[in-house]
Image (cartoon, rainbow, N blue to C red):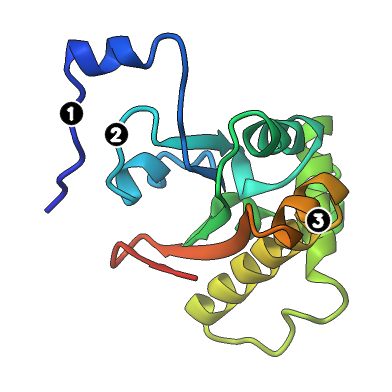
Amino acid sequence: AATRPESSAFDRRALISKQFPTVAVLSCADSRVPPELIFDQGLGSVFVVRVAGNVLATSTMASLQYAVHFLKVKVLLVLGHELCGAVKAAQLPSDQLEQEPRELSIALRGIKYNFGQGKLQGTEDPRTLDREAVTINTKRQVETIAEDEGIMGKVSSGELLVVGGFYEISSGIVDF
């Protein structure tokens, strides 16, 4: 059972002038995947960046950089999840993705690019395919974060841990 602390008016007032999250999470915008609830955390504990497919772009990367450099988080987590609609949509044929609105098409083609040539071929079981696709996408976002010199400087000095995870909606378990 969840034991997430419910913040009183006093607790919320203490957060008005400053936040002190120890973890930043890049997560999907999927309504079934709220990091604060998954990890049983209250207000001010987790800095969350949510976007369909938990993908990095200018604004999402800048948000994570802010969390690392200004808020001094100790852990940066990229959290993929079971049955991600954006990752599933990215598996559609390229010509079908081209028919989507411009921004959505760009985002889905970016995820599709992460799959590379043949990385998902030969996987017949739908659950296995889903997990593999989400895992590939999550790993690629972690690799992109690892290209950031400022973030990696914090990792090298032991101030930050960067990790990927997979949230299984059906069980509530997060695998790292």
Left or right: 13 in relation to 113:
left
Mark 1 lies on a secondary structure that is: loop
Q: Which mark is residue 42?
A: 2
Left or right: 54 in relation to 131:
right
Q: Position of residue 71 (x, y in %)?
A: 59, 31
Q: Is residue 34 visible?
A: no
Hey, what amino acid is under mark 3?
Thr
Q: Earlier in the sequence, mark 2 or mark 1?
A: 1
Decide: few, some or many residues near mark 3? Use Cα within 10 Å; few <14, some 14-19, many ≥20. Answer: few
Q: What distance separates the C-alpha of mark 2 from that of mark 3? A: 29 Å
Residue where numbered disc 1 is placed: 6
Decide: few, some or many residues near mark 1? Use Cα within 10 Å; few <14, some 14-19, many ≥20. Answer: few
Q: Which mark is residue 62?
A: none
Hey, what amino acid is under mark 2?
Gly
Q: Earlier in the sequence, mark 3 or mark 1?
A: 1
Q: Is residue 58 visible?
A: yes
Residue where numbered disc 3 is placed: 144
Q: Nearer the viewer, mark 2 or mark 3?
A: 2
Placement of 15 over or under 176, stated as above or below:
above
Left or right: 88 in relation to 100:
left
Q: Earlier in the sequence, mark 2 or mark 3?
A: 2
Q: Position of residue 44 (x, y in %)?
A: 39, 28
- Pointer 2 and pointer 3: residues touching (CB < 8 Å)? no
- Pointer 2 and pointer 1: residues touching (CB < 8 Å)? yes
Mark 3 lies on a secondary structure that is: helix
Q: Nearer the viewer, residue 158 or 31?
A: 158
Residue 41 found in image quarter: top left
Mark 2 lies on a secondary structure that is: loop
Q: Residue at x 69, y 70 (%)?
A: 136
Hey, what amino acid is under mark 1?
Glu
Q: Residue at x 16, y 48 (%)?
A: 2
